Amino acid sequence: MALEIRMYDGNLTSPTLLDDLTDRASKLQFSTALNGGFKVCRFNVSMRREEAWLWLSREGKKGRHFSRVTVHDGLTLVWEGRVMEVQLNIQMGEESVTVVCYGYWNACRDQFYSMADHTDWTAGSGHFIHEIIAEMLTEECPDINSDQSNIAEGTVDFVGLNYTTNEYPQTRINELTAVSDADHGVWFFAIWDDRKPYLFKRTVAKIDWHVWLDSFQNLSLDQSAVELRNAILPFSGTTERSTVTDAASLLLYPRREEKWNLPTGIGATPAEDAGTMHVTEQAYPRQKQAFSINGSVYRTTADSGGKLEEVPKWFIRAGEVIRIQDLVPASAALALDDVRTFYIMETVYDYDTDSLQIQPDRRSRKLSTILPGLMTLEQ
């Protein structure tokens, strides 16, 4: 196996290597997503049942649950998370275990957060998204790296947020990234390498990955108007705010309305900003069809002197931009266009088939409602 799989104990400060599984692992598959970062990784490890017995939780023994797992390409980290499921398999005389790991986004569901023991966000001022998320991570997410230098700063005061009830930080973060700033940018959150948290706005400053049509076995681009909405009614808890519309979309399509649920206590101006962000995202037919890449992908690197070079597909992550180079038109501006240039929302890489499934594009209703639910169940 070209990728290296290692398992460490649960000591994140001074980890001890438990196993180098590279030579015994098979059926490797891993994924990334937004929100979240590293999502799920699963693989099989060949072993006798006597060894597998030590991996299972039994008789007061912890087994290998919550051990840290890393997947590397040389010195480059490809995936990182912790063991959550261990399954013993005995089939046709073959013995193995299936290991299922979740990224450290899962650790944001370990402990509850409320303002009973922390900051009262309903009063005072200067309550910005980065401060709120940073406090939740510091106080209730001990497995997340304390390095918060990658948490971008917001500019809107969210005074009034009511966090009196206990809730997981993961749930709160998903709620907060549904809001926006005065620039109506789209927020995302992820836990990436070395368990470091990232809060960032979507940017399309460059094309991260280039692919041609001959890299696809089958390609279907589905621009769907099912979730098109051009009149958004924000709700802050149960409080109805002012409707926000997209005038250009209303000229082209029927008026289609939607309620947009925001955290309880969000004021009128932040609610309007969030509504504007969401109506911009939903005002036109959007690409919804996932597609799989079986052939080559390319990127521009400093080592290649500005030229495109082929790289393994397992490096591609959610939060990056990919372009299908030879789809019409021949030239296109650097922007998400629902035709050939996409923002990656989710990836699933299968090592055995060397195939990568990509879910584009912008945060659609599918990904804003279904994906957080799946992240809740799976991570």
Image (cartoon, rainbow, N blue to C red):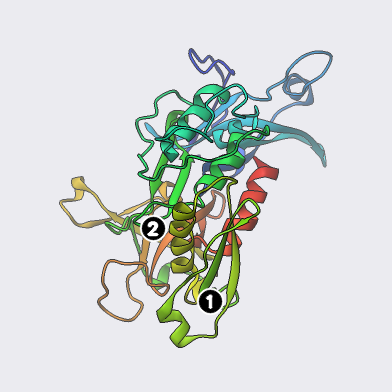
Circle 1 sits in a helix, a strand or a loop, which is it? loop
* Residue drawn at x 49%, y 48% as measured from the top left: 177
Amino acid beneath label 2: His
Point 47% across, 38% down: residue: 3
Kindly tell me whether residue 361 is visible in this rendering.
no
Disc 1 versus disc 2: nearer the observer? 2
Residue 152 percent across, percent down from the top left: 36, 39
Residue 239: name its quadrant.
bottom right
Pick whichever of labels 1 and 2 is earlier in the sequence.
Answer: 2
Residue 184: numbered disc:
2
Residue 297 screen position, x and y as percent: 37, 59
Which of 232/209 is in front?
Answer: 232
Bin the neighbour count of mark 1 within 10 Å (Cα to Cα): few under 14, some 14-19, many 20 and up.
some
* Residue under pointer 1: 222
Q: Nearer the viewer, residue 259 or 367?
A: 259
Give the residue type at disc 1. Answer: Asp
Q: Quadrant of residue 153?
A: top left
Q: Is residue 190 left or right of residue 374?
A: left
